[in-house]
Amino acid sequence: MRLAIIKLSALGDIVHTSFLPQIIKKEYPHITIDWFVEQRFSDILENNPYIDNIITVNLKDNKNNIAKEIKKIYSYKKNDYDIVIDLQGLIKSASIAKILGNGCGFDKNSIREKFASFFYKKKFFIPYEENVILRNYMLTCKCLNFKININNIKDKEKSLFYTNKNLNKILQHITKNKKNILLVMGSSWKSKVYPKEKYLSIIKQIDANFLLSWGSQKEKKDALFISKNSNAILLENMNLNELKALIDSCDLVIGGDSGPTHMAWALNRPSITIFGPTPKDRNTFKTNINLTVDCEKEINPLKLDKKDMCIQNIDENKIIKMINRLLYG
């Protein structure tokens, strides 16, 4: 059997689906799995032993040459996929499924871009409000016709991988004398970023080796503010493979609803995810070591307010209690 998975973007969404190939191969050991992904996010899937081929497309950053990208996608039709699972649920991703053939995806009542469902040969209803990790898993089970078992998620192995070359670069920042805590400074929306002043307050109350990761100049500026006013270490900008190695080497990752924070769950590392205008019950899979804190109000996933800055009001003492519980208690 040959399977194509379509999950093009974004970083956090890909991380949330990265565990699926290992589960699929337990059910079908001899299946070949190809994964279609936007080129700029492909590194997050590198070195995964459960993925046979990572196929990159460049539809988002190459809008002036869409015809070339579509021609490239058509060239993979020769692979004769037995099934193509579109975990994205967008017209763009569904179009790829249509080109490849034998598409399977969410039905029109399960996705925002309802027209996308018309491109699938098989489609299933899974509520949009359902936890995103469960949604991806449930759709995969239905498309491949195997039984849904929640323990497959709870007992998953690590689903992100890197090489020793990536690890060697970041070991200089890791200490054996204290707990290593990574603070993820940014996110895709301003309203999903926890205030730098509150991060600084946490650092001053916890005796640990704090590391600051960033991905934009604004995030770097906030990290600089913290490092200049504490003993926290400002890290150099890292690629995704280096970031995987870093997170896997830390004792705890703290950050907003963002790809790097969710990577801790994929790597089976402790984390605290701080939620503002996005729903924590939908966007994370809570475990004994992967905790969440939010604004303590109901968030409708169908009506997100990017201007809602409630994350700024979350008491840092709640996070400090979680740190002590995870690392010291």
Image (cartoon, helix red, strand yellow):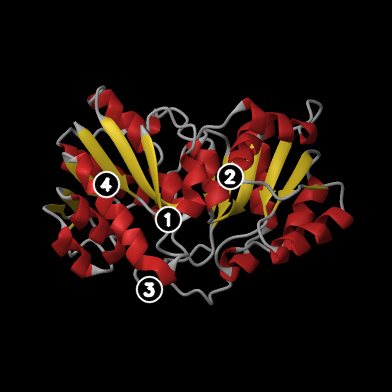
Give the residue number, with chain letter if any, for mark 2.
Answer: 240
The amino acid beneath tag 4 is Tyr
For marks 4 and 3, give the CA distance. 37 Å
Which dot, 4 or 3, sits closer to the camera? 4
**Residue at left offset 69%, top offset 55%:** 214
Among the two numbered marks 4 and 1 on one chain, the one whose residue lies closer to the N terminus: 1
Q: Nearer the viewer, residue 135 or 297?
A: 135
The amino acid beneath tag 1 is Ser
**Residue at left offset 49%, top offset 51%:** 41
Report if residue 290 is visible in the image: no
Q: CB atoms at circles 2 and 4 under 8 Å apart? A: no
Among the two numbered marks 2 and 1 on one chain, the one whose residue lies closer to the N terminus: 1
**Residue at left offset 37%, top offset 36%:** 53
**Residue at left offset 55%, top offset 68%:** 189
Among the two numbered marks 4 and 3 on one chain, the one whose residue lies closer to the N terminus: 4
Residue 303's tag is 3
Which dot, 4 or 1, sits closer to the camera? 4
Classify mark 4: helix, strand or loop: helix
For marks 4 and 1, give the CA distance. 19 Å
Mark 2 crowd level (few <14, some 14–19, many ≥20, 10 Å Cα)? many
Give the residue number, with chain letter if any, for mark 4.
Answer: 76
Does residue 204 appear left or right of residue 51 in this picture? Answer: right
